Amino acid sequence: MDNIIEIAKRAKESSRVIANLSSKVKDNALKEMSRALIEASEPILSANEKDMKDGERKGLSRAMLDRLKLNPSRIRGMSDSLVSISELKDPVGEVLGMRKRPNGLRIGKVRVPIGVILVIYESRPNVTSDVIGLTLKSGNSVILRGGSEALNSNIAIHRVLSETAEREGIPGNSINMIVTKDKKTVSLLLGLNQYIDLCIPRGGEELIKKVSDESKIPVIKHYKGVCHTYVDEDADLNMAEKIAFNAKVQRPGVCNAMETLLVHKDAAIRFLPSMLKKLRDAGVEIRGCPVTRNIIKDIKPATEEDWYTEYLDLILSVKVVEDIDEAIRHIRVYGSMHSDAIVTDNYERAMKFLDEVDSACVYVNASTRFTDGFEFGMGSEIGISTDKFHARGPMGLEELTSYKYIIFGNGQIRE
Amino acid sequence: MDNIIEIAKRAKESSRVIANLSSKVKDNALKEMSRALIEASEPILSANEKDMKDGERKGLSRAMLDRLKLNPSRIRGMSDSLVSISELKDPVGEVLGMRKRPNGLRIGKVRVPIGVILVIYESRPNVTSDVIGLTLKSGNSVILRGGSEALNSNIAIHRVLSETAEREGIPGNSINMIVTKDKKTVSLLLGLNQYIDLCIPRGGEELIKKVSDESKIPVIKHYKGVCHTYVDEDADLNMAEKIAFNAKVQRPGVCNAMETLLVHKDAAIRFLPSMLKKLRDAGVEIRGCPVTRNIIKDIKPATEEDWYTEYLDLILSVKVVEDIDEAIRHIRVYGSMHSDAIVTDNYERAMKFLDEVDSACVYVNASTRFTDGFEFGMGSEIGISTDKFHARGPMGLEELTSYKYIIFGNGQIRE
């Protein structure tokens, strides 16, 4: 446990060095790390094989095993991602504003790294290299705490990346991984607010709740996505069908997939029969409100619990609403403020939806599946914040920074 | 206690209404509130008299009684401040950026209110009206929890402002004050993260520590200011003397006042005798490092504890350092990352200090006393954040907002 405190302390010391590294040093290191990752494919794959065998023995689900699995093409993806990050604009030092005050003081606002970032995550080993790349580029030290099921893979990835980084001039203690499986480690880390500046938990609801409740460090939650698509009475129903189908079916296991379809009562009879047939043909289980079940007889009722549920699966709850106000109210009560869409050709209601739905990403006439750092043009993302604090929605490099004021005077004193 | 939960719940509901009010309605309300405050001078002053008498009976210090005291001119100041806030630009709805993606999606980033803000503060009753004004203008609901010593004054101020606001169309439950003296109330409030979005504690170290440790709500700390002025070997010593004197003496009881003076060893003999004489003539008690005490014999030694201390008083610790690196290290170890200044005519060291001192406000050749929302041109401030998170340094209206993404599509789905 002393070891953990020592790691955090040294990460803090290193953070002061990495904060002031030039873009050139950081970008070179990222490119070398990208190359080294490919070269280390063999030890990484064999470590991953061990994790896969352990996982099979422990009876992990197929979905979890699939997320855990590495192959040469996935390693190539991780490697490419490091190059992409090296090509993004360095956020550190960006001048966010500068004003001259009547007394002659020049007050500038500049972007600075946050310091030490703790990332707690589950299964997918590619998160390890993405997080290392993004925190390095944004001038932060990082402490990684991955899921125990991916421990061998993560250790192998971390080893090659941190060793390469150090060879390329990145301070040695800025890329850290906690390798013990002891669960008390997380609690210990969450109390080290003198060394760690920010915690980003990525994973299931339970993990995020535990971290938020326990942490003395500020936390940016990557909470669940109970995303809605509301089909208005003036929707282009053809467009609505495509958008809703995409939002549910294209990749049901992710946080920006639709979980609940809301339909205006005047569109329900025209829209639902064909929409629900298409979804059911694609293997989607429908759970409906009473009105929905009046229109399509053979579907299960949606319970109160359903409206709150992030299925992450081919299941959809469907509700017919009186009007846009009921839709907005429903989203407010049951949603998770992640991503919600309206499909409509009515200008006023489109604007109303944008104003009154207080989610990180609010869409008109598009699939909620676009909530993603790449799709938003940020180049990469460390996750999607469901907080209203510091960072909201997709978090890229800028969201991994803070700012400070720099003030240039020539002898000003306050009267 | 049920009552507290009910207040928080209704504040949340109201926050959705106040979030979408027009600037006109908010600004009119602020102007009417400004007028009403003057008209209610009599009940406010008599409530304040009661607090003053209670305070004297309880043996509050002169300084605390002075902060508690209201008079017609202080009420005028509070009233004027509400007008100033009404004249500031409305931050809500500001478009922070808009980009068109290759697939035709238009992705905008717009400022939105945070929601419900809990402000926990001590003594000064003018904080009550400032906070009400700033949270209203930024479209947030507020829950105020003032110090028990100012309870009657706060109730009187809150009553007139909330009643006037409601008459002018501000939703009734958006301006709330907790009036019980029960200390358990704060713990209860800090657990209501389903209703309250942000907590800002303003007050002594102990209060802020208690709130940060206990809160399930995100907290922006307004922590202590252990501010330094470093006099470099190439400083204009005349300027350095003026700046250091101003930073220590002009208003010693505030967080941006200097607590420690650092002096380069090559400047010490030329600088310290006259500087310290001037400070002592102004009533400042000096506590020095061994080198300082070699130069000026009759001063007290500074203990390890002194370097960490926010005196908020006419006391100053003085240390002679080897070079700028030692100065920066000292600030890092003992400072509070609030405001720190270098006085120098050397360009390179000025830049080094700006880069390497990781404080909210870093000054070259000016007094740290300028760290203030008004002085920074923000119009007003709700406080000064010592966090690196969400808001840093002086917090004005913008820092009381979050953002959301609004996405305009015409049928885009993800491939």
Image (tube, coloured by chain):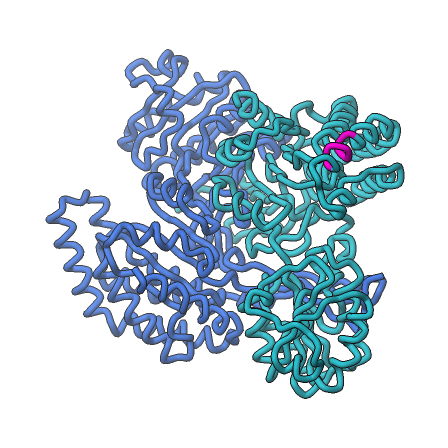
Chain colours: A cyan, B blue
> Which quadrant of the figure has residue A285?
bottom right
Number of labelled discs? 0
- Residue at figure coordinates x 80%, y 31% from the top left: A49
Toward the top, the furthest residue is B294
The answer to which image quadrant residue A259 occupies is bottom right
Residue range corresponding to the magenta coloring: A50-55
Q: Is residue B127 above or below residue A14?
A: below
Between B385 and B344, the one lying in front of the other is B385
> Would you say residue A104 is visible in this rendering?
no
Pick whichever, A357 or A102, lies toward us.
A357
Compared with residue B297, is residue B153 higher up or lower down, i.e. above or below? below
Q: Give the residue at the far bottom of this rendering.
A: A266
Relative horizontal placement of residue B378, taking residue A386 as reference (left or right): left
* Residue at the (30%, 65%) spot, across then down: B76
- The magenta stretch spans residue A245: no
**Residue depicted at x 73% and y 36%:** A55
Asked if residue A58 is positioned above or below residue B288 in the image, the reply reads: below
Q: Is residue B50 above or below residue B21?
A: above
x and y percentages locating residue B282 in the rendered image: 29, 33
Residue A243 position within the rendered picture, expressed as x and y whole percent measured from the top left: 78, 71
Residue A131 % position (x, y): 71, 39
Q: Where does residue B172 sit, x and y in percent of width and height?
A: 38, 74
Residue A53 drawn in magenta? yes
